[in-house]
Amino acid sequence: MAEHLTIGELARRTGVATSALRYWEDLGVLPAPTRVSGRRRYPPSTVELVGLVLLLRGVGFTLREIATFLAARTSDGTGWRELYQRKLAELDHRIAQAQAARTAIAHGLACSHDDITGCPRFTSGIAALLEGASLEEAHERAHSA
């Protein structure tokens, strides 16, 4: 069993702390390794699996989503597409929110009022938010008034 890795060796090869690897195992992100004298022994393929987890985390998947992704893989290789489509829609929504926030802040900086809270557009936007409008809608209302 010399080709199997200890948790310390896996951590060194991947740059992931041993505590994180144990946590990922508890969550089902990493499969439970075999044990030799009570010590975890991972097959070398686990290095690539950890790399996949790092990639998925890097593009915005949560550990729970990653566990679902790994479980959803099918023999024909298509089980992951629905998860990717949902994540893409979520990211598009977050990007739209960030763009609206950026626009609102840029307009705030361009405001001629010494105190932005005295600006009628600013207060109009707050009123729209309090009425249930999204940030995008509130911004539109404030600048169309």
Image (cartoon, rainbow, N blue to C red):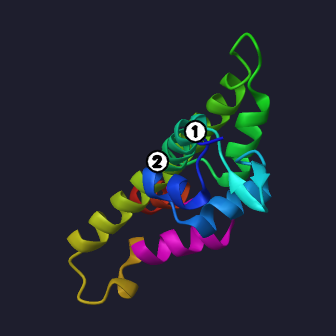
Chief secondary structure of the magenta portion: helix
The quarter of the displayed image where residue 66 is located? top right
Q: Which residue is mark 1?
A: 3
* First along the sequence among labels 1 and 2: 1
**Marks 1 and 2: which is nearer the front?**
1
Q: Residue furthest top?
A: 76
Work out which quarter of the rendered image holds the N terminus and state it.
top right
Question: Which amino acid type is shown beneath numbered disc 2?
Answer: Ile
Question: Which amino acid type is shown beneath numbered disc 1?
Answer: Glu
Would residue 58 appear left or right of 4 to someone viewing this image? left
For mark 1, does the 10 Å Cα neighbourhood hold few (<14), some (14 to 19), or many (20 or more) residues?
few
- Residue at 61% in and 64% down: 20
- Is 60 colored magenta in this rendering? no
User: Horizontal and vertical percent for residue 29?
Assistant: 71, 48
The quarter of the displayed image where residue 109 is located? bottom left
User: Horizontal and vertical percent for residue 45?
Assistant: 59, 34
Work out which quarter of the rendered image holds the C terminus and state it.
bottom left
Viewer-side residue, 100 vs 18: 18
For mark 2, does the 10 Å Cα neighbourhood hold few (<14), some (14 to 19), or many (20 or more) residues?
few
- Is 124 colored magenta in this rendering? yes
User: Horizontal and vertical percent for residue 74?
Assistant: 77, 19
Viewer-side residue, 81 vs 98: 81
Viewer-side residue, 95 vs 56: 56
**Residue 53 visible at all:** yes
Q: Secondary structure at mark 1?
A: loop
**CA–CA distance between discs 1 and 2?**
44 Å
- Residue at 67% in and 35% down: 86
Does residue 139 sit above or below 31 in this rendering?
below
Q: Which mark is residue 119?
A: none
User: Horizontal and vertical percent for residue 94?
Assistant: 53, 50
Q: Which residue is mark 2?
A: 95
Part of the protein shown in magenta: 122-136
